[in-house]
Amino acid sequence: MTQQAAALQTYNNELVKCIEDLHSKRDELNRQITQEEEEKERLQHDIHVLTEKLSRVNESLAQRLAARATFDRTIAETEAAYTKILESSQSLLSVLKQEAGNLSKATEPRRKEH
């Protein structure tokens, strides 16, 4: 029976060692799970912060794009009005020169013909 007892003791020792190895592997796995859960929480926090920041930037960008469109429209309208003023000034100057020429002719002393 001592041989059976020795074999049983050997099996028992091996079983205890296997169970300890399993506990050790489980503990290591649990440590890795905890690390990844912490990393996941950090990443989710970063995503939340970046999502809020992206929202603010998009809002600001939309306002700036609208302001730029207003500037573009105002500039185009002002340039068009300025062009019309220049054209009107040219027309006025041309008419004025023509009238001045006509007045000069009308006010010149007449030459006597012999």
Image (spheres, rainbow, N blue to C red):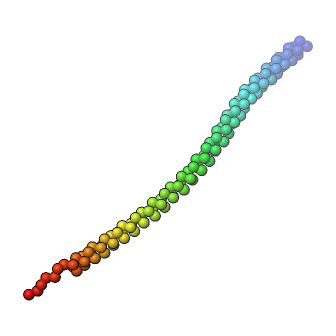
Q: Considering only vertical position in the picture, is 59 above or below 95?
A: above
Residue in front for this viewpoint, 29 or 46: 46
Residue 14 rendering spot, x and y as whole percentages: 80, 20
Q: How many tags in the picture?
A: 0
Q: Quadrant of residue 10?
A: top right
Q: Please tell me which residue is depicted at 56% across the width and 51% down the height of the picture.
A: 61
Q: Quadrant of residue 75?
A: bottom left
Q: Quadrant of the N terminus?
A: top right
Q: Please tell me which residue is depicted at 26% across the width and 75% down the height of the picture.
A: 100
Q: Is residue 80 left or right of residue 2?
A: left
Residue in front for this viewpoint, 106 or 44: 106
Q: Is residue 102 left or right of residue 73?
A: left
Residue 38 rendering spot, x and y as whole percentages: 70, 33
Q: Is residue 22 left or right of residue 101?
A: right
- In the displayed orientation, state which residue is furthest to the left: 114
Residue 78 rendering spot, x and y as whole percentages: 44, 62
Residue in front for this viewpoint, 112 or 81: 112
Determine if residue 18 is in view.
no
Q: Quadrant of the C terminus?
A: bottom left
Q: Please tell me which residue is depicted at 58% across the width and 47% down the height of the picture.
A: 57
Q: Considering only vertical position in the picture, is 56 above or below 74?
A: above
Determine if residue 19 is in view.
yes
- In the displayed orientation, state which residue is furthest to the bottom: 114
